[in-house]
Image (spheres, rainbow, N blue to C red):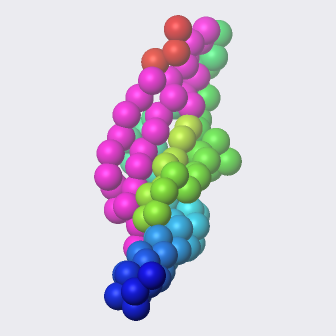
Amino acid sequence: MTRRKASVLLFALAVVTCGYLSAWLSLTACAELTYTDIQQRGVVGTDLNDHRIPIKRSDVSASVVGPFVVETTYMVPGEFHGTVHHARFVTFFTRGFWLSRDMIHLI
């Protein structure tokens, strides 16, 4: 392996390592951003008796899905059904920036 190839490989490895470290450090910040968004939009679920079920901070989970990418997930119950919400963030160390959101309606 030439010196140039080795340095390119080492640089790529350093970028990927920094990406995963950045995502790992941003897990809490991304979960907090998601929970703040839930509160601002007034998202609540309902049980079988139509009682309102607020979404708690502990209902929001965050996981690393790639270098510089964190995904948060929470479920909003709706009687017999529910909706799973996913949000993806691009991270830069302890900061998260919205990338995408989607919902899966469970039947």
96 drawn magenta: yes
In which image quadrant can residue 31 be found? bottom right
Quarter location, residue 50: top right
Q: Which x, y percent locates residue 36?
A: 46, 54
Name which residue lies at 59% across and 46% down: 60
Residue 57 picture location, percent across and down: 62, 49
- Is residue 29 visible in the rendered image? The answer is no
Residue positioned 43% across, 78% down in the render: 9
* Residue 77 is a magenta residue: yes
In front of the other: 22 or 5: 5
Residue 62 image position (x, y, % from top left): 58, 52
Please report the bounds of the magenta region as a residue range: 75-104
* Residue sitting at x 41%, y 29%: 103
Front-most of 39 and 98? 98
- Name the residue rendered at 64%, 42% in the picture: 59
Magenta segment, prevailing SS (helix, strand or loop): strand
Q: Place residue 100 in its image quadrant.
A: top left
Residue 98 at least partly seen:
yes
Q: Is residue 79 above or below residue 93?
A: above
Which image quarter holds the N terminus? bottom left
